[in-house]
Amino acid sequence: MINILRVISGSVKGLKLFTLEGMNTRPTTDRVKENLFNIIAPYIPGSNVLDLFAGTGSLGIEALSRGANSAVFCDQNKQSIDIIKKNLQHTKLTEKSEVFLGEAQLMLKKLSQLSKKFDIIFLDPPYLKKIVPGILQKLEHYGVLDEKFIISVETDIEDQLPQETETLCVSRQLIYGKTKLTFYKRI
C-alpha cells in the first residue's frame, strides 16, 4: 500500500489516506477536491453525507473533517471497503461513519429501507459507463434526499448527463482537464 491522497482541510487536515496500488479507482485530484469543497462548504456543517462509489472514501472523509455529522460510504469492491475502513480508523472518524459493500442501486434501496436521508451526495462512478442517470432516478424515488441537499457528480467530460430529471436540475457545471463536476439541486 502507498500513501497518495491527503485530507485537505478540517479536523484531520494533512493526514494521508491509503489506496491500493494498481486498484481500478481513480482518486479525485487535490485540485478538483479543493474546488468541489469550496462550492459545497455552506452545506457541510451538520450534514449527513453519502459517498456512493466511495473508492478510498476520500470525499466522505474530507466532509467529516470539515464538520459533517455523519457519512455513509458505499462501494461494490471489497478491497475498496477494506481501504475505506482503514482510512476511517487512521483518521479516527469511524464512529461518525457507516460502510456498506454492494452495488450502488441496491445500496440506495437498502439505505431507503433504513430511513437514511442525506444533505450531500457524492457520485464518482466509473467514467463513461452511463450510470449516473439511473442513480439520479433512484436517489429521487427512494426518498434518501433530505429537504435541502446538493448532489456532486464527478465524470469524464465525455459523459452525457441530464440537465433535468423529474425533481432535479443542474445548478452548476465545471471542467478541470478531462474531469467534469456537475451539481444537482431540487427543481
Image (tube, rainbow, N blue to C red):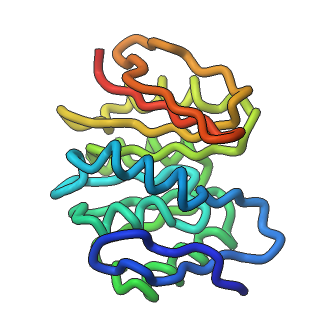
Up the image or down, 154 lies above or below 1; here it is: above
Residue 117 x %, y %: 26, 44
Residue visible at 42% across and 69% down? 8
Nearer to me, 32 or 98 = 32
- Which image quarter holds the C terminus? top left
Left or right position of 26 against 12: right
Residue 172 x %, y %: 42, 26
Q: In which quarter of the image is residue 55?
A: bottom right
Q: In which quarter of the image is residue 105?
A: top right
Nearer to me, 82 or 91 = 91
- Which image quarter holds the N terminus? bottom right
Up the image or down, 158 lies above or below 114; here it is: above
Residue 99 x %, y %: 46, 67
Left or right position of 186 against 16: left
Left or right position of 59 against 23: left
Nearer to me, 65 or 94 = 65
Q: Which residue lies furthest to the right in this view?
A: 22
Residue 11 x %, y %: 27, 78
Residue visible at 64% across and 57% down? 76
Residue visible at 50% across and 65% down? 58
The tally of labels here is 0
Up the image or down, 78 lies above or below 146; here it is: below
Residue visible at 35% across and 86% down? 92
